Image (tube, rainbow, N blue to C red):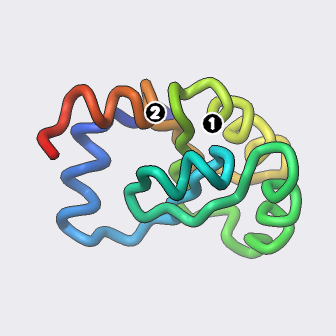
Amino acid sequence: MDDISVQELNERLKKKEEIILIDVRETHEHQEFNIGGELATLQTDLPLKILELAGHEDDEIIVYCRSGNRSGLAKQLFEKAGFKRVRNLLGGMLSWKENLPA
C-alpha cells in the first residue's frame, strides 16, 4: 500500500477517521511531541504490538517515527506478519513539524 503524506494524515485525523496509528520512536521522542499514536518502540515493543493486532490484518495501520526510516522498517515487519494495509508517514515527525502549522 502507498505511504501517506503528513497533509493527508492530518486531514484524516481532523475527520477522526478509523485508523490504527502507531509511533515507533523512543519513549523520550514520543513524550516531547506526538500526534496521538500509540507508542510501540521499534526495537522493544513493536513485535508484541504486531502480535496484539492479530485479527486486524485488513485494517489500515499508519506507522511513524522521526524521519520515516524506522517506520519504514516497521511497515516491512507488519507486512511480513500478514498485514495488508500498512502505510508509512513520509518524512515522519520532522516533516510534520516543518509542513503543518502548530
Q: Is 86 on the left or on the right of 17, as rendered? A: right
Picture coordinates of residue 93, whole percent (x, y) = 42, 36
Q: In which quarter of the image is residue 101?
A: top left
Q: Is 34 on the left or on the right of 64, as rendered? A: left
For the residue pair 74 and 100, the one nearer the viewer reads as 100
Q: Mark 1: give few (<14), some (14-19) or many (20+) Cα within 10 Å.
A: many
Q: Residue at x 39, y 28 (%)?
A: 94
Picture coordinates of residue 42, whole percent (x, y) = 77, 45
Q: Name the residue under label 2.
A: 92
Q: Which mark is residue 2?
A: none
| Position above or below: 85 against 5 | below
Picture coordinates of residue 61, whole percent (x, y) = 55, 56
The Cα–Cα distance between marks 2 and 1, rounded to whole angstroms, is 8 Å
Q: Residue at x 66, y 54 (%)?
A: 27
Q: Name the residue under label 1.
A: 71
Amino acid tagged 2:
Gly
Q: Are marks 2 and 1 in contact (CB under 8 Å)?
A: yes
Q: Mark 2: give few (<14), some (14-19) or many (20+) Cα within 10 Å.
A: many
Picture coordinates of residue 32, whole percent (x, y) = 46, 51
